[in-house]
Image: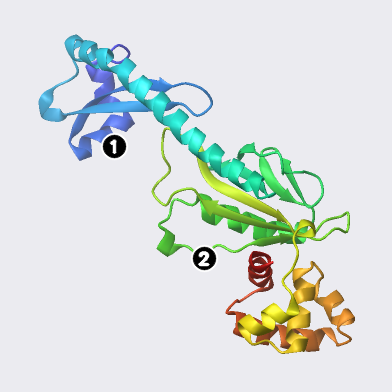
Amino acid sequence: FDHYTTEEIARDPYYAEFLHPRGFGWHAVACLREGERPLTISLKRRLNQGPFQRADLTRISRVLPYLRAGAYAAQMALGFRFKDHLDALLADGHGGILLNDEGLVLAMNAAVTQGDGLSVVEGRLRAAYPAEQGALDRAVAIAVSRAPPHELPPPSAAILHRPSGRRPLVVRVARLYDAPSNPVVDARALVSIVDTSLQRPPTGQLLRDLFGLTPKEAELAVLLGAGHSLNTAAELSRITEAHARQRLKIVFQKTETTRQSELIALLLRLG
């Protein structure tokens, strides 16, 4: 109304190619929240209603302060709720990070320590070793995807080894909600970080009782849960790595897991 003539609107591709085929002829936009990720509201009128008039815009403007207040209140309420997730992880001794719908870091709790296994580079999560970056990126991509959950593969934990030699980190990324991302809040996914050097793996006896593992199978599982690689676990068990892989397949079957990271995550829950 203030920026375009009726003739300019008729020639504009947005109107001609997008709005008009859908039966709309005009739209008005107002900003509810400014910043790097502004929140806007767009009101459209059908072709048979004619263009917006000054009186229409005056009525809309009267409502905007209430919409802005509502957006701010919703943003604050959801922000506090998501901060509660970070605090809950901190209370359990785990690191917690909030990501937006682009996978960028928004906030983290005090248990997150960077530089040994996991870092934040230009707002994104980075593994210490390039070979482990793919698993981390896939976990983030699944969590921030706009696709319905049933169209996505099940999320899995990323195991990040540490240059210091300490036991690895177990990183899980989960959606904060399954609906499309909420326009009034930036947080989309929650990252939980478990430092396995602070966790005690379950005993071999417990694994035998729960899953029917043999003593040798339980020994291998305990070694993996303690943060050892499969190669090291094989050496400590005095078997070849090929033999350890065969034994691990049986452990997967008995524990109903499919990969090493899933098995370790299960062991940490039992520890």
Image depth: mark 2 or mark 1 in front: 2
Q: Which residue is mark 1?
A: 18
Mark 2 or mark 1, earlier in chain: 1
Vertical position of residue 189 compared to residue 243: above or below: above
Identify the residue at image location x=52%, y=65%. Answer: 154
Vertical position of residue 248 compared to residue 27: above or below: below
Q: Is residue 175 visible?
A: yes
Q: Nearer the viewer, residue 126 or 161?
A: 161
The three-letter amino acid code for the residue at tag 1 is Phe
Q: Nearer the viewer, residue 133 or 86?
A: 86
Disc 2 packing (10 Å; few <14; some 14–19; many ≥20): few
- Which image quadrant for residue 133? bottom right
- Which image quadrant for residue 90? top right
Identify the residue at image location x=85%, y=87%. Answer: 240
Disc 1 packing (10 Å; few <14; some 14–19; many ≥20): few
Task: Report x, y in % for residue 209.
Answer: 65, 83
Q: Which residue is mark 2?
A: 154
User: SS at mark 1?
Assistant: helix
